[in-house]
Image (cartoon, rainbow, N blue to C red):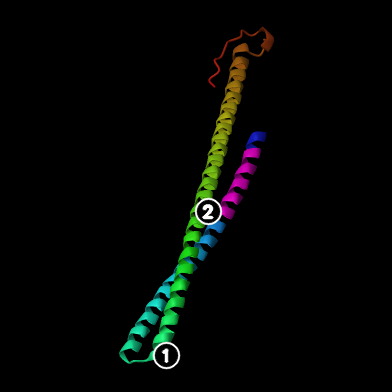
Amino acid sequence: MASQKKLIRLCRLREIEEEQSRLELERAVAVRNRLERALELAVEQEFQTKREFGESVWVYDQPGRTGATLAAGLAGMQRQNLAKRRNQWDLTVAGLREDYLQRRIGHQQIESLVSALKRKDETVAANRAQQMLDDWYRRRNQKAAIGPDRSPDKAPRREVENKS
């Protein structure tokens, strides 16, 4: 019983660890998704500035071409930086996912141990209850066989098999 209580506490602790790990994973996935959206916007901005450059070539707009060239270069650098950060967060998310899965497996193992102990305790309790009932019937039958004039010490003893 004491070990079952310890396992229940350990199960609760593992459940809390699993929950914390899940929340940490969700936060990392949210950051990664924000970076993914920012990267998509950077790619779109880079495409837009390249298109503006092309339009400025057709209208012979030198300052427009210069501005578009600088904007395209900045958008490209931003895209590269965001891509690097996203890749780093991909690795972070993968590590956190692995950590979460390990904690979840540990929690499930403890839960299965606790449920096995509970089933075992229920079986033992049911066997005890059946044994008590069998003893009661045996005493009742012995009293009926002895009769009112004989004492239980003088009654013949019968061996009963233990069914547990």
Tell me which segment is drawn in magenta.
Answer: 6-21
Q: Is residue 151 visible?
A: no
User: 51 or 37: which is nearer to us?
Assistant: 51
Callout 1 amino acid: Pro
| Amino acid type at mark 2 | Leu
Residue 80 visible in the shown view: yes
Q: Crowding at label 1, few (<14), some or many (≥20) Cα neighbours within 10 Å?
A: few
> Does the segment drawn in magenta span residue 12?
yes
Residue 151 location, x and y as percent? 69, 11
Residue 67 is situated, as x and y percent measured from the top left of the image, at 43, 86
Tell me what residue is drawn at x 61 percent, y 7 percent.
Answer: 156
SS assignment at label 1: helix
Toward the viewer: 93 or 9?
93
Of badges 1 and 2, nearer the viewer stands 1
Q: Which residue is mark 2?
A: 96
Who's the residue at 44% across and 77% down the image?
73
